[in-house]
Amino acid sequence: MRSISTRAAISSTSFTNHYEWGDLKADPLRLLEKYFDAFLYLTNWGAREFHLRLPQGLVDYRVFRTMLPGEAAHVRRAGNSVIVAFENQSEDDDWDDGTGWMGSLMSLRSEILRGDIRCLYLGWLLCAQNEEFAEDDLEPAVPAGLGELSAPLRSLIEFLGIDEDLVEVAASASAPLNASPDREELAAWIQSLPEKEKNNLLVVAVAEPGERWKNELLRRFEQQKALRTLPEPDGIRRRTAGDLLTLAHARAEERERLLEAKRAAEAARRKAEDEANRARYLDQLEKREEATWNQITAHIQKRQPNEYDKAITLLVDLRDLAVRQGQVTAFQSAVGELRQKHAAKESLLRRLTKAKL
């Protein structure tokens, strides 16, 4: 690893590199195949990639190929491994140095190995979003739990820029997620296994570190359970890529309409509140109208720009009061006299003109 880059941060589990110019002097996908379980790539021009390496014996490659037939999300074999890849060009202009993304996405590998293939369906949605499929291409089987996504799945949606309206529309056909296997069902399934296989499982559980044995056991259980509960083909209503995109577009338009209505209602509320406050202020001003004219005179006599501004503010208030009282002519006459009296004060006259007084 060090021979590839003198600047990389290298640990026993990771190889991290940041470039302002140039690029890595190696093929990162080959490094992934040989040394690592995940690869993340992010650039300041929007390119984003996330790849996972999985043991071929623990996943069903044919299912993966069915779920990921596109370009933005695809799967391939590499030796004894299966590589799942997600790639997209983000339209987000905000600079992102990549910190935290690997940590937030890495758990997807464990989810897949436990039989959770929701991230594969999200990959299919990304391809549909990028218009890689014909409009009448059917979606794959919709996994359970799309309406209750885990934190890593939400991070994947954000990282790749998958349309959240598209995800919401797809989730409408997704069954609820069973958070954990039913203990009685699991016990019955284990009891049905051959005695020799159960003994081997017990040995592996004791001898093998980590949770690979547990993940493999749960994966097998969930697969068998899915086969037992799979609905008849005639009862499945699979949507097309065109259906989903149309529904997502309609959902986005409806959301924007509701948001615009909310904005309009809030603007109307603020306007009514401002008008009520203004009316109360003018009520008070009417009681001290003469004193206000004296204040204006005092401000002008100080011959300072900020004092002129205070005078103009009070004159605008008196104009609004005159409009409400129906005494605009009298107010305009008073302002005319004020202009004549202070004709030498050019700065004041400019402010009066700007305020349309």
Image (cartoon, rainbow, N blue to C red):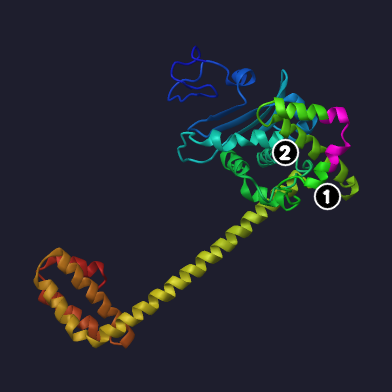
- Provide the residue designation for mark 1: 237
Name the residue furthest top: 3
Viewer-nearest of labels 1 and 2?
2
Q: Is 76 placed above or below 184 here?
A: above
Magenta run includes residue 48: no
User: Could you say where residue 355 lies in the image, as x and y percent from the top left?
Assistant: 26, 69
Confirm whether residue 261 shows in the render.
Answer: yes
Q: Is 142 placed above or below 306 here?
A: above
Position of 172 compared to 304: left or right? right
* Quadrant position of residue 39: top right
Q: Nearer the viewer, residue 78 or 291?
A: 78
* Quadrant position of residue 47: top right
**First in sequence: mark 1 vs mark 2:** 2
Dot 1, how many residues are within 10 Å of its Cα: few (below 14), some (14-19), or many (20+)? few
Q: Which residues are magenta?
A: 188-198
Is label 2 in a helix, a strand or a loop? loop
Q: Is 332 placed above or below 34 here?
A: below
- Provide the residue designation for mark 2: 117
User: Could you say where residue 51 lies in the image, as x and y percent from the top left?
Assistant: 63, 29
Residue under the point 80% across and 30% down? 62
Magenta run includes residue 193: yes
At label 1, the amino acid type is: Arg
Q: Nearer the viewer, residue 273 or 303?
A: 273
Position of 151 compared to 140: left or right? left
CB-based contact (under 8 Å), mark 1 and mark 2: no
User: Could you say where residue 59 lies in the image, as x and y percent from the top left?
Assistant: 75, 30
Marks 1 and 2 sit apart, C-alpha to C-alpha, by 20 Å
Residue under the point 72% across and 46% down? 180
User: Could you say where residue 46 lies in the image, as x and y percent from the top left?
Assistant: 52, 34
